[in-house]
Amino acid sequence: MAGDDGDWWFCLKHMKVEHGPGCPNKDRMGPYPTESAAAGALALARERNEAWRRDDGED
């Protein structure tokens, strides 16, 4: 893939990392600063959701 020169995205439709223009934004997560950050998009979202659920349970 291209170098770390711009925005990286994770496409939810194709379940893969994209660099620059690609699928419509409604079908992807990002932008991320690096390819590896985009590759971890689903894990990051899962971690954040779990943290929010824990925080909501404390109220």
Image (tube, grey):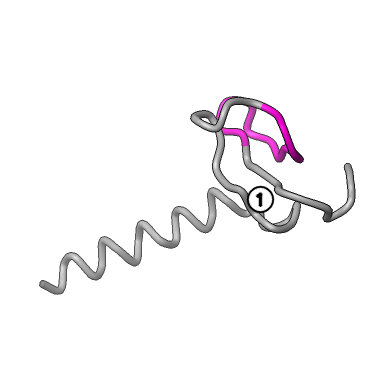
Quadrant of the rendered structure where residue 21 is?
Answer: top right
Residue 55 point in image, percent of width and height? 23, 70
Residue 20 point in image, percent of width and height? 74, 39
Q: Is residue 1 left or right of residue 37?
A: right
Viewer-proximal residue among 46 and 23? 23
Asked if residue 28 is positioned above or below residue 6 in the image, the reply reads: above
Identify the residue at image location x=72%, y=37%. 18
Quadrant of the rendered structure where residue 54 is?
Answer: bottom left
Viewer-proximal residue among 8 and 14? 8
Q: Which quarter of the rendered picture does the C terminus lie within?
A: bottom left
Q: Is residue 9 magenta?
A: no
Q: Which residues are magenta?
A: 11-22
Q: Which residue is denoted by mark 1 in the rendering?
A: 38
Asked if residue 19 is positioned above or below residue 55 in the image, the reply reads: above
Identify the residue at image location x=71%, y=48%. 7
Asked if residue 58 is positioned above or below residue 56 in the image, the reply reads: below
Identify the residue at image location x=29%, y=63%. 52
Three-letter residue code for mark 1 = Ala
Quadrant of the rendered structure where residue 57 is?
Answer: bottom left
Q: Is residue 7 left or right of residue 1?
A: left
Q: Residues within 10 Å of mark 1 (few under 14, many from 20)?
A: many
Asked if residue 47 is positioned above or below residue 2 in the image, the reply reads: below
Viewer-proximal residue among 36 and 22? 22
Determine the residue located farthest toward the bottom in the rendered image.
58
